[in-house]
Amino acid sequence: MKRTMKCLLALLLMGGGSMMAQDKLSPMVSSYVQQAKTRRAAATEEQKPGLFMVRVQPNANPDEVSGQIAGMGAEVKAAMGHMLMVAATAEQLPEIARLEGVLNIAKGTKPLLKLDKSRQVTHADEVQNGTGEQLPQAYNGEGVIIGVIDAGFDFTHPVFKDDKGNLRIKAAYMPGMTYTEGRGKKAVVDGKELEGTLFDIPEMILDTTQLKQTNTFHGTHVAGCAAASPVANVKGIAGGHLAGIAPKAELILSETYADEQQNKKYEGGTTDPEVLNVINAMNYMEDYAKKAGKPLLVTMSMNTAVGPHDGTSAESLVYKDFCDRGNIMTIATGNEGGDNCHVHKTIDANHPLKVLFSRSNEYSVINYLLTDKPAKIRIFLYDIAKKTEVATTNTYDLVNGISSKAAISKDGEDADKDELSKDLLKLMKDGDGKSRYYNSGGALAVKNGIGETQDPKGGTRHVTTTTIQSIGLMISSDIRLGIEITANESIEQRAWINSNSGGGEFENVEGFDKGSADVSVGDLCTTGVPISVGSWTANNLVVDEPGGKPEADKKETVGDISKYTSYGVDYAGHQHPFVLTPGNCIYSASNSFLSDEFNDVIAKQDFSNQFKGQTTPRSYRWVRANGTSMATPIAAGIIALWLQAAHDKGITLTIDKVKDIIKESTETDEFTQKAGIRAGYGKLNAYKGLLKVLGLPTAISELSQHQPQGMTFRIADGRLYAEGAEDGTAVTLYNLSGAIVRQSQVAGGAVSLDGLQPGVYAVQIGRLGSTLIRL
C-alpha cells in the first residue's frame, strides 16, 4: 500500500512538474515543443538544437543557472544580465523550465533595419566649431567609443579615417560570420570565445579579400551620421563639410546577419541567430570599452513590430539588461508612424476581431490574446471593390501547436497534411489547380501557441499568440487577405503588422476593424530604458547628382516631425520617441561595394590607397537617406560629445543622467507642441546639453545657452576672431570652474588669448550668445 502511494505521489509530482514547466514556456515556444512531440511520435525527423531565450529569476544567479543548463547537455551561447541564449533541443526545454532559477523560456525575433544639415539644426556644430569651417573644435567625440550595430558597412570609406590617414574603426566584429582559419580571429570575452569573426587591426579590417559587405548601404550611412570624418571638397546642402556629429570618436562596427552556416546550425529553434549575434556584439563592445578605459555608447537603427509592446518580451529585456549594466544605448522607434499598423480592442461573442491586410509583397501579422480562453480563427480573401468575400477557410480552434502552411509556385503546389494547411491551399487557387489570387504564386502560413509570459504589472499571465504570414502579391489590386477571430468570453486583443519592406498596415474598410499608428513604436524600446529616437525634418532638399540643383521634397514640412516616425505610449506606459533629431533628407557616406546605387548622390570622389591591394582609384559616394535610422545615430553622436566632456571632467554619465540632460536641453516649438506625444521631450540641442554636462549654467549664471546668430569664430595667431561682432562688444572668458579668466572687448574683429593655459573655455559675447573654444 505504501509503495502504491509513493508511486502515485511520484506521478503527481511528475505531472505537477510538467505543468510548471509548461507554464514557463512562452506561447510560441510551447507551440514548438508541442509540434516536436508530434513529429517525434511520427518519427518524421531527427531533433536538432535551436536557440531559445531563457530568462533567469531576478533573485537567482545567472552563472549558477547556466551551469545547471550545461549539465543537462544544452549549451549557453551568450548571456546578457538575467537573459541566457541557450542552444537546446525541444526535448530539453521542459527540463530546463523546471529549474527553480528559470523564470521563463521565450522566442527571440530579429530586429529589422529601419547630415550635413543635421549638424546645424541640432547645434552640434556649435559644440564642435561654431558655424564656420576653420573654427576651434571644443568637443568632437575624441576618446569616446561608438558601437554601431547594423548591416552594410564599407570599412574602406575615407570618412572612417582621420586627417592623418589612420583608421578610426578599432574593430569590426562579425558575430554571424562563421570563423575559418586564416580569416580574422576569434573574439574572446571573459575567457570565453564568442561566435563569429573579429577583425581588430587595420591590416585585417582593410583587407577586402577577407572582409567586404555588398548587401546594403545602410550601416555605412548610419555610422557616417554618427561619426564621419570631414573629407576635403565634400560639401553638403548647407555648404559646410559633410561630416558626422562626433568626427573623432572611435568606432566598433558590427553586422549581425547570420551566414548560411550559422543559420543551418540553429535551424531547429524558434529564435533567429541574429538575436544571438546582437547580444554577442553588445558584449564585445562593452568588454572592449572597459579594457580601453573609455566611455561607450551603442546605437542600433533597427526595431521590430513583433512583441507585446509592454516591456516583457525577451528581446526588449536584453537591451534593458545591457543599459542596467551601466551602458548607454539609442534605438530607432521605427518608420511606421504613417501606417495603420496596430489594432487593439476587446473581443467577445458579439464583437469579433475582423481585419484586412494591405497589399504588400511580404508581411507577418502578430495577434496577441491576453488569455488562454478558447478562441477561433478564420482566414479569408475579400474584394474591396465588390465589397464581398471571394474565398474563405473553415473556422479553426486556436489550440496550442498550430503550424500550418501552403505554397503555390510555377513549379507546383505544396501544403502540410493538416486540415488548415489544405484549406489555405484552397484559398490560394481555384478548381483547376492554378493560382487564382496570388501573382506568380505565393505562400500562407499560420502558427498559434498558448503559453506564459511576464505581466508588466508583476507576476505572469497566459497569452495566446497567433502569427499569419503572407508572401506574394495578389493578382488583383482589389483583393485583400483578412482574418476573423472570435471568442465567447471577453478577451483583450492586440495586433501588429511586421513588414520587411515597410508599409504593411490594416486597411480601413467599412465593416472591418480599423488600424492606427497610435502604438507604432517598435517593441524593443518598450522597457523604457534605452533612449528611443524619432525623426524631425530639418531638411527637405533633394539633390540627385553632384552639383545638381536642390529641389524640395514636399511630402515633408521643414520643422515638423517626420510623418514616418513611429510613436505611441506603449502598454507599459512609456512614451515614445523619447527625443527627436533630424532624420529626413540626410546626406552621409554610402557603401562603394554595392553594384547599384539607389539613393540620390550629393558628392562623389575617387580615392587611392584605401585598402589592401588597391591598384586603381575607387569611387566613393555620399548619398541621401530618410528615416529614424538616420536620426538615431545623430542622437548617438550628440551624446558622444557629452560623454567626452564628462570624461574630461572625471564624471561618469549613466543613461538616466543622459535622459535628464535631454529633458533639460531639448527645444520645443509650434511643431512639437502640435505633435503631442509624437514629439517626445522635443528636439535635441547638443550645445545646450553640453553646457548642462559641464555645469556651466549653474556655475556661470550670465552665460547664454545659445550661440550668437550669424557669427563665426576661429583661432589664429593667439587671437579669437569673432567675425560678425562689432568692435567694442564686451567679451568674457570663463574656465570650466566658472571663474572669469579674461574680460575684454572685440578690437579689430578679435580678442587676444595670450597667456591662457591649454584647455576649454566658455566665451560670452556681449548679449549675443556664447560659444566654447579649446586652446
Image (cartoon, helix red, strand yellow):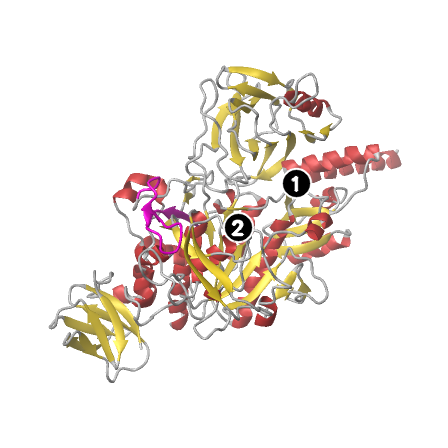
The answer to which of marks 1 and 2 sits earlier in the sequence is 1
Task: Kindly give the residue lying farthest to the left in the view shown.
Answer: 728
Is residue 613 a member of the stretch shown in magenta?
no
Q: Position of residue 189 (x, y in %)?
A: 63, 65
Q: Which residues are magenta?
A: 532-557
Locate residue 753: give its quadrant. Answer: bottom left
Residue at x 68%, y 64% (from the top left corner): 192
Lateral position of residue 674 relative to residue 516, left or right: left
Question: Residue at left 34%, top 70%?
Answer: 137
Q: Main secondary structure of the magenta part?
A: loop
Q: Is residue 537 magenta?
A: yes
Q: CA distance from mark 1 to mark 2?
A: 48 Å
**Which quadrant would residue 696 be assigned to in this image?**
bottom left
What mark, if any, has residue 596 been given in the picture? 2
Quarter of the image with the C terminus is bottom left
528, 455: nearer the viewer: 528
* Visible residue check, residue 691: no
Identify the residue position indicated by label 1 in the image: 24
Q: Residues within 10 Å of mark 2 (few under 14, many from 20)?
A: few
